[in-house]
C-alpha cells in the first residue's frame, strides 16, 4: 500500500503509522518500507487494505485514545483528539 510520507513516524522500534479503528481509537502499527520516493512511501507490511492511516498525527495522541476523523481521502485521514 502506498501512503504519503507524512503518515510515517519513526520510533525507537522503527517506523510506525497511526491507524484509526472502527471505534475511533488510534493504534500505532509497526510497518516496513518497501520503497520511498520522498513524498510517497510504499509499505511492505504492517497495515491491511481498508485501514485508515492518519496523516500528520499530533504527538499528543497516544495509543488507544479516541479521536475524531476530520477529513478523509481514501484510506488516509486527518484526526483530532476528542475533548477529554
Image (cartoon, rainbow, N blue to C red):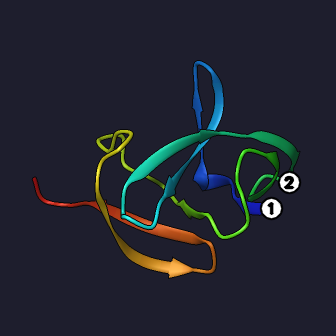
Q: Which mark is residue 74?
A: none
Name the front one of labels 2 and 1: 1
Disc 1, SS? loop
Above or below 82: residue 30: above
Count of numbered badges drawn on the protein? 2
User: Measured from the top left, where is residue 69 in percent x and y?
Assistant: 37, 71
Side (left or right) of 31 relative to 55: right
Q: What residue is rendered at 74% in x and 59% in y?
A: 39
Pointer 2: residues within 10 angstroms few (<14), some, or many (20+)? Answer: few
Residue indicated by mark 2: 37
Q: What residue is rendered at 66% in x and 70% in y?
A: 50
Outermost residue toward the front in this view: 23
The quarter holding residue 31 reads: top right
User: Measured from the top left, where is residue 2 in percent x and y?
Assistant: 79, 62
Q: Foreground residue, 79 or 66?
A: 66
Pointers 2 and 1 in contact (CB under 8 A)?
Answer: no
Side (left or right) of 50 relative to 37: left
Disc 2, SS? loop
Outermost residue toward the right in this view: 35
Residue indicated by mark 1: 1
Q: Foreground residue, 28 or 3?
A: 28
Above or below 28: residue 84: below
Pointer 1: residues within 10 angstroms few (<14), some, or many (20+)? Answer: some
Q: What residue is rendered at 47% in x and 61% in y?
A: 21
The quarter holding residue 40 reads: bottom right
Which quarter of the rendering shows the N terminus?
Answer: bottom right
| Cα distance between the residues tagged 2 and 1 | 14 Å
User: Measured from the top left, where is residue 11 in percent x and y?
Assistant: 56, 26
Sequence-first tag of 2 and 1? 1
Outermost residue toward the top in this view: 12
Q: What residue is rendered at 82% in x and 42% in y?
A: 33
Amino acid at each position: 500500500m502506498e501512503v504519503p510520507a507524512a503518515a510515517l513516524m519513526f520510533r525507537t522500534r522503527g517506523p510506525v503509522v497511526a491507524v484509526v479503528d472502527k471505534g475511533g481509537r488510534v493504534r500505532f502499527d509497526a510497518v516496513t518500507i518497501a520503497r520511498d520516493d520522498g513524498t510517497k512511501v510504499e509499505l511492505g507490511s504492517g497495515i491491511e487494505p481498508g485501514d485508515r492511516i492518519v496523516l500528520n498525527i499530533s504527538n499528543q495522541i497516544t495509543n488507544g485514545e479516541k479521536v475524531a476523523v476530520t477529513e478523509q481521502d481514501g484510506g488516509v485521514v486527518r484526526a483530532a483528539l476528542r475533548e477529554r
